[in-house]
Image (tube, rainbow, N blue to C red):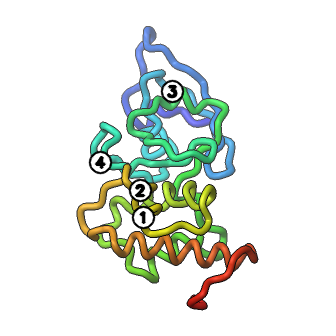
Amino acid sequence: MTHLFEEIAAEPGQDTPVRRVTITVNGQRRTADIEPRLLLAHLIRQGLQLTGTHTGCDTTNCGACTVLFDGEPVKSCTMLAVQADGHEITTVEGLAGASELHPLQEGFKDEHGLQCGFCTPGMMLTAKAFLGENPDPTEDEIRWALSGNLCRCTGYQNIVKSVLWAARKMRAESGSGSDEDGS
């Protein structure tokens, strides 16, 4: 069990409520005693030391804090950690296997889909959920799917190319669909 008060703040007072939560994060079951007001983003970053989840705006506008909540993208900066009790969370650290990158990570690398990298984890997780629903998207569909995630560096073109690259690779690996251009 993880006691987050030692890592995040001073020990809670006697009148501070504490709630025990159990969350599966990147396939690993984790239990923590937390204050009910703790945000999921803070549990992930400070409590569990998974710093790939970024916080940029604290208002759900930028999407840098996006994680997958039972497979669906959510913005963890405005979700309470107690709401995740009994659920499964995937962070960007959970995308890659032990010895190889996820196709989205490869795509962002090969197609230069990042510059500063601040928005990248949220973009990748949003794209992962989207590609799970639509494995053969158009550029416009990708742009719409990522419209809740802001990037201030890239102009989005290479992000879209990265997701298209990953979609092609994922289709090829699953044996579904073929590409006319052979890439």
List x then y, in percent, for residue 159: 39, 70
Q: Given the current orientation, which residue lies at the most extreme right position?
A: 175
Single out the mark in the foreground, 4 or 3: 4
Label 2, label 4: how far apart the Cα atoms are: 21 Å
Label 4, label 3: how far apart the Cα atoms are: 23 Å
Label 2 or label 3, whichever comes before in sequence order: 3
Q: Name the residue carrying label 4.
A: 56
Label 4 or label 3, whichever comes before in sequence order: 3
Q: Name the residue carrying label 1.
A: 140
Amino acid type of the residue that numbered disc 3 sits on in the rendered structure: Ile
Circle 2/circle 1 CB separation < 8 Å: yes
**10 Å neighbourhood of mark 1: few (<14), some, or many (≥20)?**
few
Circle 2/circle 4 CB separation < 8 Å: no
Amino acid type of the residue that numbered disc 2 sits on in the rendered structure: Trp
Label 2, label 1: how far apart the Cα atoms are: 6 Å
Image height of 11 relative to 49, above or below: above
Q: Name the residue carrying label 3.
A: 34
**10 Å neighbourhood of mark 3: few (<14), some, or many (≥20)?**
many
